[in-house]
Amino acid sequence: MTTTAYAPALTGHYGFREAARMEWIKLRTLRSTSCALLLTVVGMIAMGVVTMANTKAPHGASKVASFDPTNNVLAGVALGQLIVGVLGVLVVTGEYASGTIRATLAAVPDRRLALTAKAAVFGGLALLVGESVTFVAFLAGRAALAADVPHPSLGDPDVLRAVLMSGAYLAMVGLMGIAIGAITRHTASAIGVFVGITYVLPALLAGTTGTAVAKFFPTMIAGNSLAVTVPVDGMLSPWAGFVVLCLFTAALLGAGGRLLVRRDA
């Protein structure tokens, strides 16, 4: 009698590498991802070019001292953050809406690992796109300046830092969208919370209390701290603003991870 030996069945195990690869496959196969990122690139470059083409040379000592063309050319970040943030929300809530989250969590039962993989993959993509588009927008906008307007250069003080931080800001906004999506699990409510944090609340607070509180909100930090080469009175310094954004993003992601574990426990 002949006995046939069979190899033992392999037990499936997903670590971070496998989870991240799975998230990358899902992300790059969604048509909405490429469309949204293309819209971000085109919109930011177009806004930068239009803004710089309409920038006039400053006249008077005070206007010359406060003139910041770098901040003008990075105006498209206001549009880019909306698109990237909403896309970050959809990366999470889209799976809950379609029911594919069941397959994701069946493959990766560790909810925190699944969220970490989503954040790492989308955050890395958003960082790559953000840095690329801010550099292109800067160069294109600079070329659109009138001859009599001072042209900023990447070699000028704080210009390179402003461009790099603005690109990194888009990545952090994308991570905020993922975190808010994980907290609410509902697309409409998550987008509402995201828009409230980035646009509505800062505007309301700035109108009622000035910059005392509003300066700590993402949009105010992006426009008045990260993207400036001339300090703005009453606002955070670039590096202080960057640290606040990092802490805020980490806190949101931590809350999203904790809620995922509690709800599915």
Image (cartoon, rainbow, N blue to C red):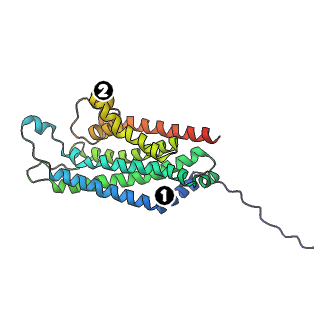
Number of numbered discs overlaid on the protein picture: 2
Q: How far apart are the two marked residues, 2 and 1, measured between alpha carbons?
A: 39 Å
Does 125 sit left or right of 184 as displayed? left
Q: Residue at x 48, y 53 (%)?
A: 121
What amino acid is found at the position of numbered circle 1 in the picture? Answer: Leu
Please rate how many residues cluster around mark 1, counting C-alpha atoms within 10 Å: few if below 14, some from 14 to 19, many from 20: some
Residue drawn at x 46%, y 43% as measured from the top left: 190
Quarter the N terminus occupies: bottom right
- Check whether the beta carbons of the residues at disc 2 and disc 1 lie within 8 A of each other: no
Location of residue 141 in the rendering, given as x and y in whole percent from the top left corner: 20, 54
Q: Residue furthest left?
A: 60
The one nearer the camera, 118 or 154, is 118
> Which element type, helix, strand or loop, lies under badge 1?
helix
For the C terminus, the quadrant is top right
- Occupied quadrant, residue 137: bottom left
Q: Residue furthest right?
A: 1
Determine which residue is flagged by label 2: 212
* Towards the viewer: 152 or 258: 258
Q: Which residue is mark 1?
A: 27
Q: Is residue 188 left or right of residue 259?
A: left
Rendered position, 74 above or below 230:
below
Q: Nearer the viewer, residue 213 or 188?
A: 188
Residue most extreme to the bottom: 1
Could you tell me which residue is drawn at 32 percent across and 34 percent down? 202
- Say which amino acid is labelled 2: Ala
Q: Is residue 195 visible?
A: yes
- SS at circle 2: helix
* Callout 2 crowding tier (Cα within 10 Å): few <14, some 14–19, many ≥20: few
